[in-house]
Image (tube, rainbow, N blue to C red):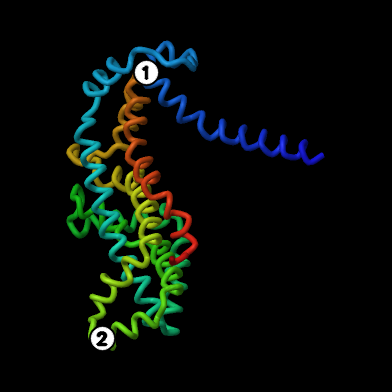
Amino acid sequence: MVKLAQAFKYSFLIAAFLIAVFPFYWMIISATNTIPDILRGSLLPGLNMIQNWVNLLKLSPLRMAFTNSVIYSLSVTFVSLLICSLAGYGFEVYHSKAKDRFMSFLLVSVMVPFAAVMIPLVQLVSGLGLRNTTLGFMLPMLSSAFLIMLFRQSSRAFPIEMIEAARVDGLSEVSIFFTMYVPTMKATFAAGIVIQFLSSWNAFLWPRLIMTPGGGSITMPMLLINLQEGHITDQGALMLAALISSVPTMVVFFMLQRYFAQGLTGTIK
């Protein structure tokens, strides 16, 4: 009976693994095949990747889109982590009932769908003259209620005695944050990097609304949509572009996966 249960468990896990991995496998295989092979559903690798690469460069500004996505994602991630970590640190270290009420308000904002605030945001950014600008793209993503909550929860495990001892030794609050808090909370920062980088890299609706008129601001998600909007879609070039777009997010995740789960649970070692 035990062996039967184990066999069922492993069969289920193998099936779940194959279902999860198959779309990625299909994307890689399709990036090497011709359009007829892709439409026919071929599951074997082909020899057409170089031609798909040539077609992709002809059909789209790949280098520009990839460079823009890297710059925007890294900039948003860095600034957002700085703002959210400072906010989470302040909410917990300088604790008060008023801050608790304000934090509750921030958490409620997480439940509001983006579609509900999209039009006011567009009007606000347009009124500030930030349409088609990098700042207009970045501004709404520079603060995240979820990340603030994540850093606040993790800060509860940060020993307050260390802060008090550092204050006695004459360290400023800024020095305490950067020399003591940041190194200690590296797991939380790693989790924040993964979450925010993936979010900013895959952002589509907001940059599409704000940056569409400016062709020089195209990002990888916008490029993928543009490749599908023609009368004839080059499936091979599209799959190759999707594969290229997936690489940075996978690299970031696999580099930081060691700390990801630890950071989400707020564990400090």
Residue 204 visible, this angle: no
In this picture, residue 106 sits left or right of residue 230: right
Q: In the picture shown, does residue 203 fall above or below 239?
A: below
Closer to us: 176 or 85? 176
Identity, as a three-letter code, of the amino acid under mark 1: Thr
In this picture, residue 193 sits left or right of residue 78: right
- Label 2 neighbour load within 10 Å: few <14, some 14-19, many 20+: few
Identity, as a three-letter code, of the amino acid under mark 2: Asp
Q: In the picture shown, does residue 173 fall above or below 238?
A: below
Report how far apart the C-alphas of labels 2 and 1 lie in the structure: 62 Å
Q: In the picture shown, does residue 102 fall above or below 251?
A: below
> Which one is earlier in the sequence, the residue at label 2 or at label 1?
1
Furthest residue in direction right, as rendered: 1
| Occupied quadrant, residue 130 | bottom left
Coordinates of residue 59 in the picture (x, y in percent): 24, 23
The tag on residue 67 is none
Coordinates of residue 17 in the picture (x, y in percent): 56, 35
- Label 1 neighbour load within 10 Å: few <14, some 14-19, many 20+: many
Coordinates of residue 181 in the picture (x, y in percent): 33, 71
Question: Circle 1 is placed at which residue position?
Answer: 32
Which residue shows up at 19% across the image and 35% down it?
64
Residue 21 visible, this angle: yes
Coordinates of residue 1 in the picture (x, y in percent): 82, 39
| Occupied quadrant, residue 68 | top left
Which residue shows up at 33% across the image and 14% down it?
48
Closer to us: 69 or 203? 69
Report if the CB atoms under discs 2 and 1 are less than 8 Å apart.
no
Which residue shows up at 19% across the image and 59% down it?
128
Question: Circle 2 is placed at which residue position?
Answer: 169
